[in-house]
Amino acid sequence: MKKIILDQVSKKFRIGFTKNQTALARVASTLSGREPQKELWALKDVTLTVDSGTILGILGENGSGKSTLLRVIAGIYQADGGAIKTNGKIISLIGLNIGLQDRLTMKDNIHLCCSMFGLSRKTIRERFDEIVDYAELNEFTNTKLYQFSSGMLQRLAFSMAIHCNPEILLLDEIFEVGDEHFKKKSTETLKKLVGKGATILLVTHELWMIQKYCDKAIWMEEGKIKRHGNTEDVIPNYLQQKPVNAT
């Protein structure tokens, strides 16, 4: 079953930039609050299908369109062209931005975020202990999130996501924080989800993780898919044509 279908999807942004102006023009621009703008195409005619039970790794340098692609699929951004079709419940963890409220306790955040992910109050109560245990945060139930470290927030966000029955899971740099123990546990959990038919899109700087856990990979460059195929084919080409420290 095709879980994600993109047909010539494009997304543009309007960004401010500096151009040669006379002193009078610069003053007028400042007073009016209007600055010169230009269009930046973050995605250009991206066509992609992702099957059920697939972990797709997304490679590319910063600014290549990786995160924009996930946001368009998640519905955070509206595409400016093309068509998007998804089949299944989408949960996105993009920079840990899943609605966490730092002035609320962990307990309150679990109830808030899991309800946003579609769980009933009864189901949240039933899974509450499992979420906390998986995140290894049993001692912090009534602690407000502004006191949490980045690693604690990452564990909490991931635990909530996997306990909310995702059919399509979008992960953007979610493994860039956290210790090796939790990374290992998380990746094993992802494999189990995929075994049940979930589809996962993973953006990460850790190429070893894509190589080890992803069936397929795409290499993005300047908003386009430069290469798409089996992971063992995409990664070597990416490394050959990019600097060693490219991400």
Image (cartoon, helix red, strand yellow):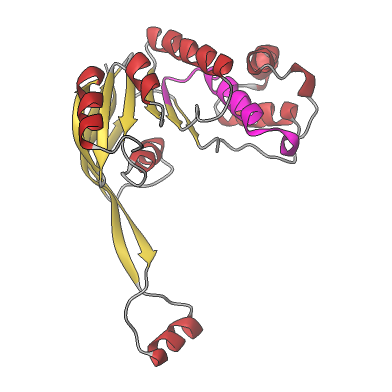
Residues 219 and 237: in front is 237
For residue 99, which quarter of the picture? top right
Residue 156: in sight, yes or no? yes
Q: Position of residue 168 (x, y in %)?
A: 40, 23
Toward the front, the furthest residue is 244
Toward the bottom, the furthest residue is 24
Q: Is residue 131 above or below residue 86?
A: above
Give the quadrant of the C terminus: top left
Q: In the visual, does 233 lie left or right of 139? A: left
Q: Is residue 31 above or below residue 100?
A: below
Per the rendered image, the range of residues in magenta is 145-169
Residue drawn at the location 38% of the way across and 36% of the way down: 70
Q: Position of residue 125 (x, y in %)?
A: 70, 16
Residues 104 and 155: in front is 155
Residue drawn at the location 29% of the way across and 32% of the way down: 85
Q: Is residue 40 above or below residue 168?
A: below
Q: Position of residue 127 (x, y in %)?
A: 65, 13
Give the main secondary structure of the magenta stretch: helix
Residue drawn at the location 36% of the way across and 25% of the way down: 207
Residue drawn at the location 66% of the way across and 27% of the way down: 152
